[in-house]
Image (cartoon, rainbow, N blue to C red):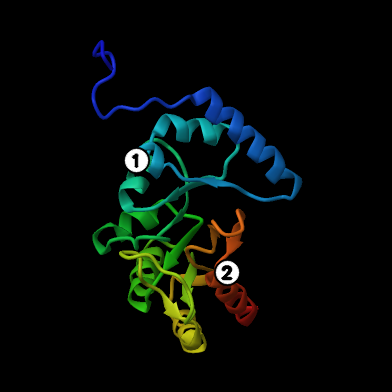
Amino acid sequence: HKNGILLPDTYIIDLDMVTNNAIAIKEEADKYDVSLYFMLKQLGRNPLVGRRLKELGYAGAVCVDWRDARVMVENGIHIGHIGHLVQIPSAAVEKVIATRPDIVTIYSLEKAVEIGGAAKRQGFVQPVMLRVLGPEDILYSGQYGGFQFNELPKVVKAVEKISGVRIAGICSFPCMLFSKETGNIEPTPNATTVRRAACYLE
């Protein structure tokens, strides 16, 4: 920085260490037949890291927003999951759905209709996850949204009538948080809501 080689607001990623960590995580996941996605929002959506993780066999990217999705698609990286913290903007739905993400999180019936319409026009059915909220669940400011657990029967019936989408799962955020009291990562009430909602769907 002092010599001006690195400009202000620049950070360095040790790609060798990222690779080593990614290999260790994947080797453990493979033992249990768990498919892995990666998220690069915190690394500036860096496509070099994304391509390396793709080479290592990661299934795709979790795109927090449509900008994430754009960078990944432009660099030949598959979108595994999008819509979890921020819904796909209406103006970007057609382009994002054209990439055929593995799964899209929805917070509303209106968004399900938009996604279903785009998928139907493109000749396929898009798997979606319902973000479900229980009365005791934790939510962060600016990330509020989803279906109330007690409305799930009505919501499921409504989504099942929307052509172009199919319900493939349930999700929430945050489901696990570090506890200062116990020193461990502990489940939040959201995790209980997800389990209850999944049992209902089953």
Q: Position of residue 76 (x, y in %)?
A: 43, 37
Local crowd at mark 2 within 10 Å, few (<14), some, or many (≥20)? some
**Residue at point 44% right, 65% down?**
105
**Residue at point 57% right, 69% down?**
191
Q: In the image, is 11 to the left or to the right of 57?
A: left
Q: CA distance from mark 2 to mark 1?
A: 31 Å
Q: Which residue is mark 1?
A: 71
Front-lying residue, 7 or 94: 7
Quadrant including the N terminus: top left
Q: Position of residue 132 (x, y in %)?
A: 48, 75
Could you tell me which secondary element the residue under label 2 belongs to?
A: helix
Front-lying residue, 181 or 150: 181
Under mark 1, the amino acid is: Val
Q: Is residue 179 above or below residue 139?
A: above
Q: Disc number at residue 91? A: none
Q: Earlier in the sequence, mark 2 or mark 1?
A: 1
Q: Is residue 183 above or below residue 8?
A: below
Could you tell me which secondary element the residue under label 1 belongs to?
A: helix
Q: Choose mark 2 or mark 1, whichever is in front.
A: 2
Residue furthest out toward the top: 3
Under mark 2, the amino acid is: Ala
Q: Quarter of the image holding residue 196?
A: bottom right
Q: In the image, is 43 to the left or to the right of 26?
A: left
Q: Disc number at residue 191? A: 2
Q: Quarter of the image holding residue 21?
A: top right
